[in-house]
Image (cartoon, rainbow, N blue to C red):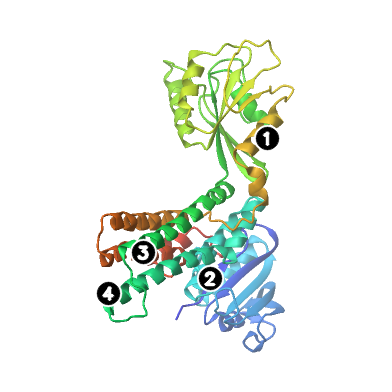
Amino acid sequence: MFDTICAIATARGIGAISIIRVSGPEAIPKVASLFRGKNLTKVKSHTIHYGHIVKDGEIIDEVLVSVMKAPKTYTTEDIVEINTHGGIAPTKKVLELLLENGIRLAEPGEFTKRAFLNGRLDLTAAEAVSSLINSETDLERKLALNTLDGKISKKIKQVRDLIMELIANIEVNIDYPEYEDALVITLENLRPKLQAIKTELESLLDEAKVGEIISNGIKVAIVGSPNVGKSSLLNTLLKENKAIVTDIAGTTRDTVEGEIELKGIRLKFIDTAGIRKTNDVVEKIGVDKSLATIEEASLVIHVLSNNEELSKEAEEIMHKLKNKTCITFVNKNDLPAKLQIQAPNLVYGNTLSLDGIEALKNKIIELFDLENINTSNLEVISSVRIINLIKEALKSINEALNNVTKKIPVDMLAIDIKQAWILLGEITGETYQDELLDTLFSKFCLGK
């Protein structure tokens, strides 16, 4: 039996109200002993009551108390929520009284952890609770809600059922060879079944690319030679003076970051130091960071100057970008043209008249298909944990397929197949280790 826990469920600070949540077998009697008003042990479930929290006859705060009895609660346990005035002092004092009364302070995410352990949520839904709380865009909100509704779990369970059916047939063949109604699993008919499972897993990973973009945004590196207008472009896109702009080459020594929202997707811009050979120790560190940022970015905007011929440094940058998703932005198109260049995704503009800025944004929308992402059903995976587990399950299925080619006996192939089934079970929590739960729920806030 779980003990009784409590935590502040609202943001810390001054506000209209604060909510202190209590969950566990003694939630109602423990709070009732501090409450002056109706007898909370005798009220109906899912009702709210006016009164005061008192200690030794002294009124601590005027409150509204919600009583919700098991099992129809967030944790499936008895829950009491105390609505106090939103000041720091009254909230802290009521919490102290609860702790003095034998109720334990909840660990981060412990309410949701109990909801999982009590069977109300699976692990995908539990993760979605955290994603919903931390969502910054409307698309992130919708994505989290779809996961919370069990749409991702359903997809995982469908693939897991396919694997389980295959495992069951193999084990019947091994343990009960005389059972004539069972499908006889041979290397010949095993391959298409494994291939079908592989296709389902690859489809989930392909769909997950959309989820990753929505959840993590798009990391955009702005690179180029010194003094081509990288910092000016960043400031223009952000509509604020985030980066220092001067006519002196090498002004930007470190990365400068900013973020905007485009079609519901967060674009995380990183202005980098101008890339060139230099003997300046500090500037060289900045150049090295610029090169590292290129590798990490999902999109690179290579800025060139329209009034300068293509330099050797710029050619070297273009060579480094040949395998990256890249937009070439030719800045200063209001000045006499000296640059001659041919490149895919070429956009001309300048940061003074803002010519080309909308064209640049539209090119980003086109490259990442943001219009379709914005209107898709969003029944896709975004969790890094889930994606990694699917990749591991796919690896096991591929290993089984390779062993079919090698004509390894079917009973030996069952090991890899079962491993894929176990890994997919970790996604929903049907199979899990305690360490996984500790790590997952430690990322939650205290009151959730």
Compare marks 3 and 2 and give the one earlier in the sequence.
2
What is the distance, in whole Å, between disc 4 and disc 1 at their CAs?
59 Å
Determine the residue located farthest toward the bottom in the rendered image. Answer: 42
Q: Do the residues labelled 3 and 2 touch (CB within 8 Å)?
A: no
Which of 371/52 is in front? 371
Residue located beneath label 4 in the image: 174
Q: Above or below — where is 348 with respect to 34?
A: above
Q: Which of marks 1 and 3 is in front?
A: 3
What is the distance, in whole Å, between disc 4 and disc 3 at their CAs?
16 Å
Secondary structure at badge 1 equals helix
Numbered label attached to residue 362: 1
Compare marks 4 and 3 and give the one earlier in the sequence.
4
Badge 2 crowding class, 10 Å Cα cut-off, few under 14, some 14 to 19, many 20 or more, is: many
Badge 3 crowding class, 10 Å Cα cut-off, few under 14, some 14 to 19, many 20 or more, is: few
Secondary structure at badge 2 equals loop
Amino acid type shown at disc 3: Asn
Badge 1 crowding class, 10 Å Cα cut-off, few under 14, some 14 to 19, many 20 or more, is: few
Compare marks 4 and 1 and give the one earlier in the sequence.
4
Amino acid type shown at disc 1: Asn
Q: Which of marks 4 and 2 is in front?
A: 4
Residue located beneath label 3 in the image: 189
Q: Are marks 4 and 3 in contact (CB under 8 Å)?
A: no
Q: In which quarter of the image is the N terminus?
A: bottom left
Compare marks 1 and 3 and give the one earlier in the sequence.
3
Q: Above or below — where is 295 with respect to 128?
A: above
Q: Which of marks 3 and 2 is in front?
A: 3
What is the distance, in whole Å, between disc 1 and disc 2 at their CAs?
40 Å
Q: Quadrant of the C terminus?
A: bottom right
